[in-house]
C-alpha cells in the first residue's frame, strides 16, 4: 500500500513479495483514499524506486491497479512500475507508465508474451499533473485493456502466455534496470498486481471505494 511511516521496507499486504525503498523515497505523503489514514510514497523522478524482487506472472491473465499523482507536466516514458531486464520499453515483460502522445500525457500499458519478440503497447486516457488518477491495466488472454478512474480508455487484441524472466526485476517507481531513464515523478499509492484479469464492473467498484458512502442518520449540535 506504500503507507509506511518510516524505514526502507515496502510491506506486501499479502505477505508474498515485500519490497525495499531505495535512494530516499519520501514516505507519509498525501494518500489517495478519501477519509483514510493511509499515506502514499513520493518518488523524485531521478533515482527513487522500490525493489520488490524477481517474481513472474504466469498463464495468460493479469491486472495492475494503482493510484498516481504526478508532480510534473513532463511525463514522456515515465514508469509507475514494471518488470524488465533491459532499458528498452519494447523488451518489458510488463509495465505501466506514461508517454506524451497526441498532444497529451497518456497511460502506456506494455506487455510481452511468449510468442512475441517485442512488447505490445496500449495507450489510453489523459494523465494530469497534480491530480490523483486511478489506473488499471488488464490482460485477459484475448485483449489488453486500460481503465482510468473506473472507465475503459483503451483496448487492443493480444494473445499468448505472459513472458517470464528470472533475471527481470520488478520495481515500483520506475522500470528496471535504470531508474534515471524512467523514474516516476510524484506520488504512488495502493499498488496491486493480480495474477488474474479484472472485469469492468470490478474496476469500477475499486474506483468507487475511494469515496466512502456515508448516510447521516441524525445531526446533533
Image: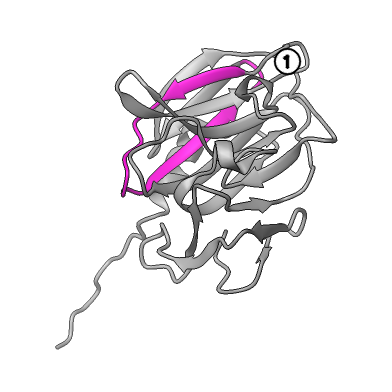
* 79 left or right, relative to 210: right
The image quadrant of residue 165 is: top right
Q: Nearer the viewer, residue 142 or 29?
A: 29
Q: Classify 10 Å Cα crowding around label 1: few (below 14), some (14-19), many (20 and above).
A: some
- Farthest-out residue, bottom: 221
Which residues, given as a range, are shown in magenta? 120-142
Q: Residue at 77%, 48% (x, y): give it.
A: 53
Can you give x and y, in whole percent of width and height, for residue 19 in the image? 71, 57
Which residue is disc 1 drawn over? 160
- Farthest-out residue, right: 166
Q: Nearer the viewer, residue 182 or 3?
A: 182
Can you give x and y, in whole percent of width and height, for residue 36 in the image? 42, 68
Query: What colour scheme governs how the chains and residues are painted in the rendered image of this protein?
Result: one colour
The image quadrant of residue 54 is: top right
Q: Secondary structure at mark 1?
A: loop
**Does residue 190 sit above or below 157 in this rendering?**
below
> Would you say residue 22 is visible in this rendering?
yes
The answer to whether residue 132 is magenta is yes
**Does residue 206 sit above or below 110 in this rendering?**
below
Can you give x and y, in whole percent of width and height, for residue 169 in the image? 75, 40
Quadrant of the rendering where the N terminus is positioned? bottom right
Q: Residue at 76%, 11% (x, y): give it.
A: 115
- Farthest-out residue, left: 221
Q: Nearer the viewer, residue 122 or 201?
A: 122
Q: How many marks?
A: 1
Can you give x and y, in whole percent of width and height, for residue 41 in the image? 51, 60
The answer to whether residue 177 is magenta is no
Q: Residue at 73%, 11% (x, y): give it.
A: 117
Q: Residue at 72%, 18% (x, y): give it.
A: 113
> Would you say residue 197 is visible in this rendering?
no
Amino acid at each position: 500500500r506504500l503507507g509506511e511511516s518510516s524505514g526502507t521496507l515496502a510491506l506486501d499486504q499479502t505477505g508474498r513479495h515485500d519490497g525495499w525503498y531505495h535512494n530516499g523515497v519520501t514516505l507519509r505523503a498525501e494518500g489517495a483514499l478519501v477519509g483514510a489514514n493511509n499515506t502514499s510514497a513520493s518518488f523524485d523522478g531521478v533515482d527513487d524506486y522500490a525493489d520488490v524482487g524477481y517474481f513472474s506472472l504466469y498463464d495468460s491473465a493479469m491486472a495492475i491497479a494503482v493510484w498516481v499523482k504526478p508532480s510534473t507536466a513532463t511525463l514522456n516514458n515515465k514508469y509507475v512500475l514494471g518488470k524488465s531486464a533491459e532499458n528498452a520499453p519494447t523488451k518489458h515483460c510488463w509495465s505501466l507508465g506514461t508517454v506524451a502522445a497526441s498532444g497529451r500525457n497518456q497511460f502506456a500499458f506494455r506487455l510481452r508474451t511468449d510468442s512475441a519478440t517485442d512488447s505490445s503497447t496500449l495507450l489510453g486516457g489523459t494523465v494530469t499533473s497534480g491530480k490523483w488518477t486511478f489506473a488499471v491495466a488488464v490482460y485477459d488472454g484475448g485483449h489488453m485493456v486500460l481503465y482510468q478512474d473506473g472507465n475503459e480508455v483503451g483496448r487492443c487484441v493480444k494473445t499468448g502466455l505472459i513472458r517470464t524472466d528470472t533475471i527481470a526485476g520488478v520495481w515500483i517507481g520506475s522500470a528496471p534496470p535504470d531508474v534515471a531513464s524512467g523514474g516516476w515523478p510524484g506520488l504512488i499509492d495502493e499498488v496491486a498486481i493480480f495474477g488474474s484479469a479484472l472485469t469492468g464492473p470490478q474496476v469500477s467498484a475499486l474506483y468507487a471505494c475511494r469515496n466512502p458512502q456515508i448516510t447521516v442518520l441524525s445531526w446533533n449540535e
